[in-house]
């Protein structure tokens, strides 16, 4: 797959700063907010894809988190006994279904989909034929789940980030430690995987993976009307809240669910609608 081949084998830098482009990517919000919905997979992949385009120097409008979430739920449902399709339900989805949905129908912008910020009252509205047609000019061109573990996984993760590929990952988010996070470096959590976010950066000392710090982007918003951080920690100018830092042991426990994505226009000159 294109994403796998793009990782290369150059020496790893001590750090990356992809997040510097996150807040201003495509003129949209740097940190997305899933609100009171279960659309974290859609938001994690939307953050990653939008940032990927910004890092390539070809920014696009914010990719629709709910469009990705809708397509994943559509491709994952089975017909009823009478042949009809069950209604969409806001029960979450899986990264493999996000990928399958993009392969099946494509990618569309949040502006065209008309669904951002996430709204519980509309989260289960069925896409129209026109909605699906708007997504058809862009599609997934590569998807690669990192299959390694332990230190090799951490090295592979850094390699992807250094090459400009944000990585989505399932994580555990139900503990008080994560729910109440306001800064610092997270260690391993014992809870079951129940959430998704995107890794965008790392730093380390160049020798010991015990020094590794990964920067993740969550989808629980950033600041309230007064500018106070709602969740996460402040970072570079323009990136207030919504981000977290985690150590080697935190990210290594989620090695089975880390996905590198690449997307491109189906045809030359196509634009993300």
Image: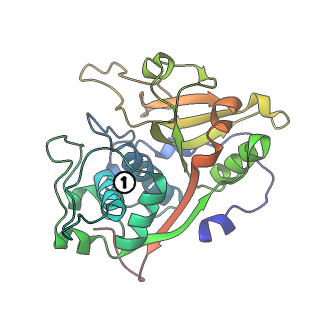
> Which residue is pictured at 50% across the width and 57% down the height?
52
Coloration mode: rainbow
- Image quarter where the C terminus lies is bottom left
- Image quarter where the N terminus lies is bottom right
- The foreground one among 41 and 245 is 41
Residue 85: where, in percent of width, then height? 21, 64
Residue 211: where, in percent of width, then height? 76, 28
> Which residue is pictured at 32% across the width and 37% down the height?
33
Q: Is residue 111 left or right of residue 194?
A: left
**Element assignment for label 1:** helix
- The foreground one among 11 and 256 is 256
Q: Which residue is mark 1?
A: 26
Q: Is residue 58 left or right of residue 130?
A: right
Q: Residue furthest bottom?
A: 267
Residue 198: where, in percent of width, then height? 50, 44
Task: Give residue 251's quadrant in the image.
Answer: top right
Residue 14, relative to residue 126: is it above or below? Answer: above
**Dot 1 alpha-carbon crowd within 10 angstroms: few under 14, some 14 to 19, many 20 or more:** some
> Which residue is pictured at 43% across the width and 71% down the height?
103
- The foreground one among 160 and 94 is 94
């Amino acid at each position: 797959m294109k994403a796998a081949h793009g990782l290369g084998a150059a020496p790893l830098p001590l750090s990356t700063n992809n997040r510097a482009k996150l807040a201003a990517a495509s003129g949209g919000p740097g940190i997305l907010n899933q609100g009171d919905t279960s659309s974290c997979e859609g938001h994690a992949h939307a953050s990653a894809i939008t940032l990927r385009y910004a890092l390539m120097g070809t920014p696009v409008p914010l990719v629709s988190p709910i469009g990705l979430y809708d397509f994943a739920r559509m491709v994952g449902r089975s017909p009823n006994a009478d042949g009809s399709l069950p209604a969409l339900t806001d029960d979450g989805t899986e990264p493999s279904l996000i990928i399958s949905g993009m392969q099946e129908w494509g990618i569309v912008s949040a502006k065209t989909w008309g669904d951002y910020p996430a709204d519980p009252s509309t989260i289960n509205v069925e896409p129209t034929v026109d909605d699906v047609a708007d997504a058809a000019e862009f599609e997934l061109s590569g998807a690669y789940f990192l299959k390694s573990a332990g230190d090799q996984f951490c090295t592979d993760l850094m390699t992807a980030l250094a090459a400009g590929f944000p990585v989505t990952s399932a994580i555990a988010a139900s503990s008080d430690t994560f729910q109440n996070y306001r800064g610092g470096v997270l260690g391993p959590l014992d809870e079951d995987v129940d959430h998704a976010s995107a890794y965008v950066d790392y730093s380390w000392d160049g020798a010991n993976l015990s020094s590794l710090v990964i920067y993740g982007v969550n989808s629980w918003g950033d600041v309230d009307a007064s500018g106070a951080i709602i969740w996460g920690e402040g970072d570079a100018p323009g990136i207030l809240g919504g981000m977290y830092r985690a150590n080697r042991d935190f990210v290594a426990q989620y090695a089975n669910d880390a996905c590198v994505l690449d997307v491109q226009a189906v045809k030359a000159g196509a634009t993300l609608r």
